[in-house]
Amino acid sequence: MGLKQRVRHDMEAISNEWVESGHLNPGDIFVVGCSTSEVAGERIGTSGSEEIAAVIFEALSALPSKLGIAIAFQCCEHLNRALVVEKETMLRHSLEDVSAIPVPRAGGSMASYAYKHMKNPVVVETIRADSGIDIGETMIGMHLKPVAVPLRFEQRMIGNARVTAARTRPKLIGGKRAVYDRRDAGYDAY
């Protein structure tokens, strides 16, 4: 199996795991960090590939229509890990756009490809995502809401890159008298 076919297979597997997890809800923001260099088996930032980005983008593009989520594609460090989102997402979540257009050498191949293929893309500097996937250790944590909870999916690699997945949950506040589950508080399960 060639690299593109392997990436397609891996992305299909992890996308299915996300759908089955129940952690993606309508209106959620899902952040994607991706090093196509790492997917190809090279060191991050050295061998970006929009061909690999195309396969990953195609697999992830089904999630918004299927689940009602918004996807944010993280740029590389040369754009301070800004994010490519649809303008509709920026407006709905009161995000602020910045003046930058990702290209493979400043933004990364994944963000560059996403920018070229989204309906109405904009770049925003910060976001507070509900969940995300990090392909190739690109460090998406700065874009997740507190508190991030790692997910242990079976699909641990995309091509040659390690994959980390996380969802978020509300902070647990209070003390020993606090109740965190509606059932424990006497409410019906929701």
Image: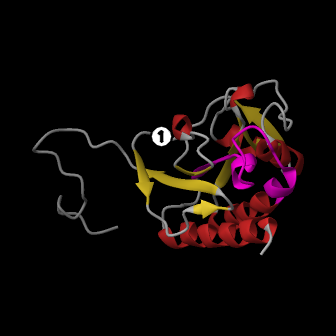
Label 1 sits on residue: 145
Does residue 120 show up? no
The type of residue carrying mark 1 is Lys
Assess disc 1: are there few (<14), some (14-19) or many (≥20) residues with their C-alpha within 10 Å of its C-alpha.
Answer: some
Tell me which residue sits at (83%, 49%) in the image.
49
> With respect to residue 25, does 130 lie above or below?
above
Label 1 residue SS: loop
Instruction: Residue 172 in the image: state x and y as whole percent.
Output: 27, 43
Residue, x 26% and y 68% (percent of image)?
188
In the image, residue 134 lies at what x, y percent? 59, 49
- At a point 69% along the width and 62% down the height, the residue shown is 159
Q: Which residues are magenta?
A: 28-54
Q: Nearer the viewer, residue 64 or 59?
A: 59
Q: Position of residue 112 (x, y in %)?
A: 83, 42
Residue drawn at (57%, 70%) of the image: 19
In magenta stretch: residue 45: yes
Q: Is residue 95 left or right of residue 4?
A: left
Percent x, y for residue 73? 70, 45
Residue 189 lies in quadrant: bottom left
Q: Residue furthest top?
A: 99
